[in-house]
């Protein structure tokens, strides 16, 4: 008998405010040197949509914050799992910016989001260990991988893994990339179970590249030299990040599939970080080519980025939960389905795990 990590419940929360692409028509978009981009906003937005496929995204209402989203997603996951939250051994929250108030754009990391979530869930058990995992967009996937190690070591049997991010409050209104980002939270309850037959997570792999790639995503001041203060905003070297993703993610996904003793033809779904539709399609097409396959079945990669935008650590668990709850009618999970969960982001970090649906 071996110990395998399985998902027993999921939940998500998407904010109520829907921001459409046309809402950016009045923005003054500048380049990194502070110069106005020599195109009208309608053309800028159309090109952005053609590349990313993003049509709209979700923003938090002023009275809510990251821990609120994480708490609601957690409640839904716990309810779906049908467990007593006091039986959780770990609460791991993947996030990168802590709490950021609507009226004060400063990161608040004390106490951690995980501590706040445990408090909101009113869990008394002191052996339920709560901590945050800042790991860029791959944070939620890495949280699941960490818990898998805990289960296999005998240290734990049950964990709550959350991805929650509030990006709408750290975006520069003068940066085109501001249109990519969104808010949201996703959560799963996972357990370590004994099984003679492989189920749940059967292989995983993570890599970090920092020699020349560490600052492809970073915090910096506004592109507007006349901005009112020195507030730091999320900044991305899009071209370099795109190249990095295409050069590393397909290789790592191939490695983890082969580590599981499988081939690409065995994979039913790939749940990939919803970063940029053009990039995600290119990543998976290149993955198939690494396996000697020229054609990639479109149904293998569910996409929600067009309506949800990129909410970082939340994209993968939100996607999973939406499929479980039949909110994407064209996609379902069936017992025995083999899936790859994969992500790439700040660090630069890449990770993936192969999962057999119970």
Image (cartoon, helix red, strand yellow):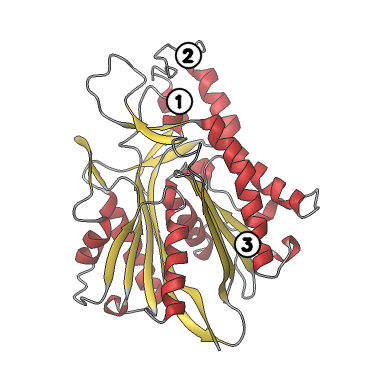
Q: Residues within 10 Å of mark 3 (few under 14, many from 20)?
A: many
Residue found 60% across the figure and 30% down from its top? 50
Is 144 above or below relative to 137?
A: below
Any part of residue 296 in sight: no
Which is more toward the observer, 307 or 181? 181
**Quadrant (top left, top right, bottom left, bottom right) of the C terminus:** bottom right
Q: Do the residues under discs 2 and 1 have CB atoms within 8 angstroms? A: yes
Q: Residue furthest front?
A: 211
Residue 331, quarter of the rendered image: bottom right
Q: Nearer the viewer, residue 271 or 77?
A: 271
| Closer-to-camera residue (262/275) | 262
Q: What number is the disc on residue 329?
A: none
The residue drawn where x is 50% and y is 74% is 6
Q: Which residue is mark 2?
A: 37
Question: In the structure shown, which secondary structural element does the residue marked by tag 3 occupy?
Answer: helix
User: Counting residues from the N terminus, which is met first, the one under dot 2 or under dot 1?
Assistant: 2
Q: Is residue 162 above or below residue 280?
A: below
Q: Position of residue 114 (x, y in %)?
A: 27, 60
Left or right: where 227 falls relative to 338: left
In the picture of the structure, the residue carrying the numbered disc 1 is 176
Q: For the N terminus, which image quadrant?
A: bottom right
Residue position marked by numbered label 3 in the rendering: 256
Point out residue 209 in the picture as x, y percentages from the top left corner.
Answer: 51, 45
């Amino acid at each position: 008998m071996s110990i395998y990590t399985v998902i027993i419940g999921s939940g998500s929360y998407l904010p109520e405010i829907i921001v459409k692409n046309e809402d950016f028509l009045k923005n003054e978009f500048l380049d990194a040197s502070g110069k106005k981009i020599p195109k009208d906003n309608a053309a800028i937005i159309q090109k952005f949509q053609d590349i990313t496929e993003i049509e709209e995204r979700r923003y938090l209402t002023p009275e809510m914050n990251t821990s609120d989203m994480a708490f609601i997603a957690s409640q839904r996951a716990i309810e779906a799992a049908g467990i007593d939250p006091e039986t959780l051994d770990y609460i791991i929250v993947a996030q990168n910016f802590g709490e950021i108030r609507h009226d004060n754009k400063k990161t608040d990391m004390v106490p951690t989001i995980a501590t706040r979530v445990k408090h909101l869930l009113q869990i008394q058990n002191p052996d339920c260990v709560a901590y945050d995992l800042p790991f860029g967009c791959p944070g939620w996937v890495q949280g699941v991988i960490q818990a898998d190690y805990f289960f296999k070591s005998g240290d734990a049997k049950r964990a709550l893994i959350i991805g929650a991010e509030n990006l709408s409050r750290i975006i520069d209104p003068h940066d085109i990339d501001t249109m990519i980002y969104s808010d949201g939270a996703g959560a799963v309850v996972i357990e370590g179970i004994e099984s003679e037959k492989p189920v749940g997570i059967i292989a995983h792999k993570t890599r970090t590249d920092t020699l020349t790639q560490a600052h492809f995503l970073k915090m910096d001041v506004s592109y507007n030299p006349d901005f009112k203060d020195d507030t730091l905003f999320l900044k991305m070297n899009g071209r370099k990040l795109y190249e990095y993703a295409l050069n590393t993610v397909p290789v790592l996904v191939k490695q983890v599939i082969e580590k599981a003793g499988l081939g690409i033809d065995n994979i039913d779904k790939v749940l990939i970080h919803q970063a940029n539709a053009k990039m995600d399609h290119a990543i998976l097409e290149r993955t198939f080519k690494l396996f000697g396959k020229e054609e990639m079945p479109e149904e293998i990669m569910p996409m929600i980025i067009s309506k949800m935008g990129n909410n970082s650590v939340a994209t993968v668990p939100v996607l999973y939960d939406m499929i479980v709850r039949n909110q994407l009618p064209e996609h379902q999970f069936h017992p025995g389905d083999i899936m790859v969960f994969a992500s790439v982001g700040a660090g630069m970090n890449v990770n993936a795990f192969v999962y057999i649906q119970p």
